[in-house]
Image (cartoon, helix red, strand yellow):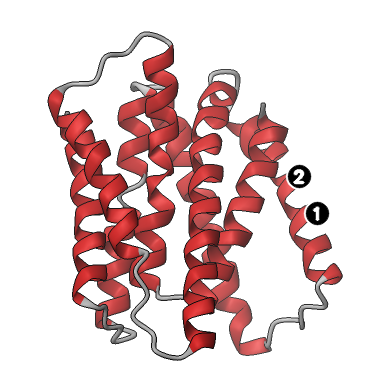
Amino acid sequence: MSLAAGGTSVISLIALFRALAIGTMGVVAPLSATGVALPIAIGLITGDRPSAAVALGMAAIVAGVVMASRSRHDDADQRTAGRWSIALALVAAVGFGGYFVLADAAADGSILWLLALERTVSVPVALGAALALGAAAPARHDVAALVATGALNLAGTGLYALASTRGALSVVAVAATMYPVVTALLARGVLGERLAPVQAAGVGAAMTGIVLVLVG
């Protein structure tokens, strides 16, 4: 389970980072969080019954994906990049949803082994992808930021694994997907990103859906 979680995690992160690189952060981040529907679906299959709030939240997430997917670019190349970023964000969403399920099962055995084994897969896969795609080595002034990013990712993974051993998968997974709130605020405040009205409404709907699922 830990090895599978590691493979799923790195593929999801590659898709997410590429989507962030070519798309709008305020759209990509919320869409990548919609993978929470997978743990919820598994809960339904195994006997969970959603409340009215959860059902409404899932509907809002779907509506948000559709609205946020509307392109605001007039240039054909920009529209293509926008569509690719959305597709990659949804790939990341599916991967993150699968990771939530796999990590939840693996953490029951050992959180530390989950983190260790996950990295034995994710690091070689990421390095192999970088070499295969001919990615340039990071500039010296970017190393500190990359190390900090890796440390935050590891800390977040560990905290999620710990939380999954203390609470229900559906609740913990939804709580873990609240990161787009911070990402969207930073994109707005730091990068000055602007969304089309329909995209902003879609992002808001997706975030509202996540909150409804959490509350429900």
Toward the viewer: 115 or 2?
2
In the image, what residue type sits under mark 2? Val
Q: Which residue is mark 1?
A: 124
- Measured from the top left, where is residue 20 in percent x and y? 49, 71
Q: Is residue 182 left or right of residue 4?
A: left
Q: What residue do we see at 21% from left, 30% from top?
A: 54
Q: Are marks 1 and 2 in contact (CB under 8 Å)?
A: yes
In the image, what residue type sits under mark 1? Pro
Q: Which mark is residue 71?
A: none
Toward the viewer: 173 or 75?
75
Corner quadrant of residue 110: top right
Toward the viewer: 175 or 12?
12
**Outermost residue to the top:** 47
Q: What residue do we see at 59% from left, 60% from top?
A: 15
Marks 1 and 2 sit apart, C-alpha to C-alpha, by 6 Å
Q: Is residue 204 left or right of residue 182?
A: left
Q: Which residue is mark 2?
A: 121
